[in-house]
Image: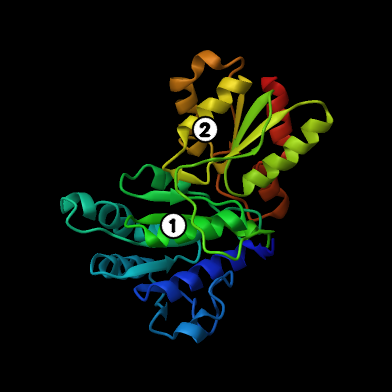
Amino acid sequence: MRELTYRDALREALREEMVRDKTVFLLGEDIGRYWSGAFKVTKGLAEEFGDERVRDTPISESAIIGVAVGAAITGMRPVAEIMFGDLTTLAMDQICNQAAKICYMFGGQTTVPLVVRTPFGAGVNIASHHSQSLEAWFMHTPGLLVAAPSTPFDAKGLLKTAIRGNNPVMFFEHKLLYPIKGEVPEDDYTIPFGVADVKIEGEDATIFATLYMVHKALAAANELRKQGISVEVIDPKTLVPLDKQAIIKSVKKTGRIVIVTEDCKTAGVSAEVAAIVAEEALDYLDAPIKRVAEPDTPIPFSPPLEQFVIPNEKTIIKAVKEVL
């Protein structure tokens, strides 16, 4: 099977959906002819589809999402790009009070088929305002779906599902994933939300990991295997809906779980997963739940300090050995 980068898989999904459905259009800062997006995901699309369907916007996140919500409820399928995930904070009313609630507030008489694409995560030395992981904020908002693909295959399939659906979707992409390559079929395909992927099967402990942390978890699992420790790695692919049964099934098998995420530890994604395990699989645990996440601190600009706060293979291996 051919290989594509994560970036190219996203671009291919956007292009195919724009060809398939004339109501799909893109909008965001610098996504058009001049810049092609901060991470070049939209490269070439303005030239192919024109400026009406690939719209460069002013530097106003609230305007981008406000326009997208209005377009969605009047029959279009907008895909809005927010240049950095941190800047979703400038459109929280439009996302959390409008997009997320309109279907409910109008008794299901209208839907909001909107996708908000945005990169999250640290590791590229661009300081606190451009390096956060805020997935848990949007998990906490009823009415929003949350996608977090870790591979090119999942990125393309989940994005196509998101665009074709009738719900607002927060589609999160880690910055360090864009150059990663993986197998992507040439045939049209979609991936359902709410179905986790068991990346590696194991017997001794479960690692639940998201986005770029999936790759670090896999590296840790490979190292642990050399030491005779069998680890199961679970990638949820979507956080809302979350495949709780896959998590519980794995914990029942291994009796131990290490939860690895890049967001802050307090009230983060790892806290929700830990609560699920505590509520629904406590009797199957042979050791306390262990969480590996960033400390509750702004992401440093200094490269050594940034690497210090980001979870890595060594901290994951240490956590697994602790639960064993």
**Could you say which is closer to the camera, residue 112 or residue 124?**
112
Q: Earlier in the sequence, mark 1 or mark 2?
A: 1
Residue in the image at 53% along x and 36% along y: 265
The residue to which callout 1 is attached is 161
Residue 32 drawn at (x, y percent)? 49, 80
Quadrant position of the N terminus in the picture: bottom right
In screen coordinates, is 48 left or right of 310? left
Picture quadrant where residue 60 is located: bottom left
Residue 273 drawn at (x, y percent)? 49, 32
Whether residue 28 is visible, yes or no, is no
Residue 36 drawn at (x, y percent)? 54, 77
Q: Residue furthest right?
A: 226
Residue 239 drawn at (x, y percent)? 46, 43
**Could you say which is closer to the camera, residue 194 or residue 285?**
194
Q: Which residue lies furthest to the front in this view?
A: 187
Whether residue 174 is visible, yes or no, is yes
How packed mark 1 is, by other alpha carbons closer than 10 Å (few <14, some 14-19, many 20 or more), is some
Quadrant position of the C terminus in the picture: top right
Picture quadrant where residue 263 is located: top right
Decide: is 272 above or below 164.
Answer: above
Residue in the image at 54% along x and 84% along y: 34
Residue in the image at 19% along x and 52% along y: 108
> What is the C-alpha distance between the residues marked 1 and 2?
21 Å
Label 2: element kind: helix
In screen coordinates, is 242 left or right of 107? right
The residue to which callout 2 is attached is 246
Q: Which amino acid does label 1 sit on?
A: Thr
**Could you say which is closer to the camera, residue 41 or residue 134?**
41
Label 1: element kind: helix
Q: What residue type is labelled 2?
A: Ala
